[in-house]
Image (cartoon, rainbow, N blue to C red):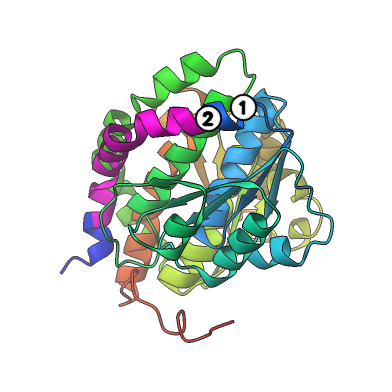
Amino acid sequence: MKYQMYYDILEQPKAIKETIKAESTHMNEISEKISQADKIYLVGSGSSLSTLYSTKDALEMASNLDINICTGYEFYYNKRIDNKNTVGIFTSQSGETGDTLTGLRRANELGMYTVSITNEDNTPMLNEAKDGVLTRASHEDSILGTKTYISQMYSLYNILFKASDYEKSENLLKEMKTIPDLMEKVIKNSEQENKELAEKMKDEEIFYVMGSGPNFGLAYKTSMTMFMEGALKHSCPIYSSEFRHGLIERAEKDVPIIFLDADYPSDEITKKAIEFSNGLNAKTMVYNLKDYANVDNLLAPFILVIPLEWFVYYLADFNGEDPGSTRHIGKVRY
C-alpha cells in the first residue's frame, strides 16, 4: 500500500510547472512593486516558515534586501514593526492558518502592502491581502507539505530574487526554470537508496538535522514537520555553526545526525562537524547537493528536500505510520 504522500512527492515538478504557467506574469508585477521597499517582513508557520528561512538566507548571501522573519503571533505582538515603505509577505498552504492570518490583518491595519502566497483559492488570506499568489499544487491532504512546500518556496524565490539587487539574479531565475526537470530525475534516482536507509534507521527515536545558509530552512522543515509530524520521531534542527554548542556533547556513538551540505562558504563548518561526528562513530548521514544535481547552490533546498522526503516517507512506513496523517494537529485552536 502507498500512502498519499507518495503520490504528492511525484507531483512536485508538475506543481512548479503549473504555478509558473499561471502566476509568472503576476509574480513579476509583484516583484516590481516591492523592488523599492525599504524592509520586507516574511511571515508564516510550520512548513511555510521553513520556506521563509531558506529564502531569507539565500537572499542574504546574495543581495542587500532587508528581510525579517516572524511567525504570525510574533508579528502581531511586535510593538516595533516598521510600516514605512514596508512589505509584508504572508505564507500559508491552506490560506487559513490562524496565527498567520492574524498577522496579515495587523499588517493591513498598519497600511502595509501585503502579499499572500497560498495553495487554496477563495480563502481569507488570499481575499484579505492586497495582492496574492495562488500556487497550483492542487489540494494536498498530507500534513507534511511536499508539492505545496516546493511551489511556495519557488514563488518566494521568484518574487524576491527578481526584486533584489543581486547581480546574477537573471542567471539564477533562468536556472530555476530547470528545477522541475532536475527534480523528476532526483525523485526517480533517490527513492531506493533512501528506502534502504530508512529500513536501517527505523528503530531510532531521535534525529538531529544540521544545515547552513538556505539549507537551515530545509533542516527546520525536516525536523519540525517531516520527522515530528510525519514519522513521529523526536528531532531537532540546528545551524551547522552551532554544532559545537550543545550537540557536540550529545554526538556520541550511534546517535543519528543528518548533515545537509551544498558547499556554501559556511559549509566549511559543516564539513568539520561531519568529520568530528564520524570520529565518534555517530550515525552520520550526509546529503550533499553535488551527489544529486549540478545546480547553483542557492537552489539546494529544492533538490535536497527530495531524498529527505523519501527517507521520512519510508521511515514512517516501516513503523506502520501514515506520514500524511495527524494525531493532534487541528485539535488545538489559538
Q: Residue visible at 43% across and 62% down? A: 95
Q: Residue visible at 42% across and 84% down? A: 327
Residue marked by disc 2? 31
Q: Quadrant of residue 39?
A: top right
Q: Would you say 259 lies left or right of 271 here?
A: left
Q: Quadrant of residue 322?
A: bottom left
Q: Nearer the viewer, residue 117 or 146?
A: 117
Q: Is residue 218 visible?
A: no
Asked if labels 2 and 1 touch by Cβ distance under 8 angstroms, the answer is: yes
What percent of the width, then of the height, locates residue 212? Answer: 65, 40
Residue 11: in magenta span: yes
Q: Would you say 77 lies left or right of 128 here?
A: right
Residue furthest left in the image? 1
Looking at the rendered structure, the kind of residue marked 2 is: Ser
Task: Determine whether 327 is above or below 17 in the image.
Answer: below
What percent of the width, then of the height, locates residue 115? Answer: 53, 47
Q: Would you say 174 lies left or right of 206 here?
A: left
Helix, strand or loop under label 1: loop
Residue 254: in magenta span: no
Mark 2 crowdedness (10 Å alpha carbons): few <14, some 14-19, many ≥20: some
Mark drawn on residue 189? none
Helix, strand or loop under label 2: helix
Residue marked by disc 1? 35
Q: Nearer the viewer, residue 79 or 176?
A: 79
Task: Determine whether 89 is above or below 207 in the image.
Answer: above
Looking at the rendered structure, the kind of residue marked 1 is: Ser
The quarter of the picture where the N terminus appears is bottom left
CA gap between label 1 and label 2 equals 6 Å
Magenta range = 8-30
Q: Residue visible at 67% across and 27% down? A: 36
What percent of the width, then of the height, locates residue 154? Answer: 43, 38
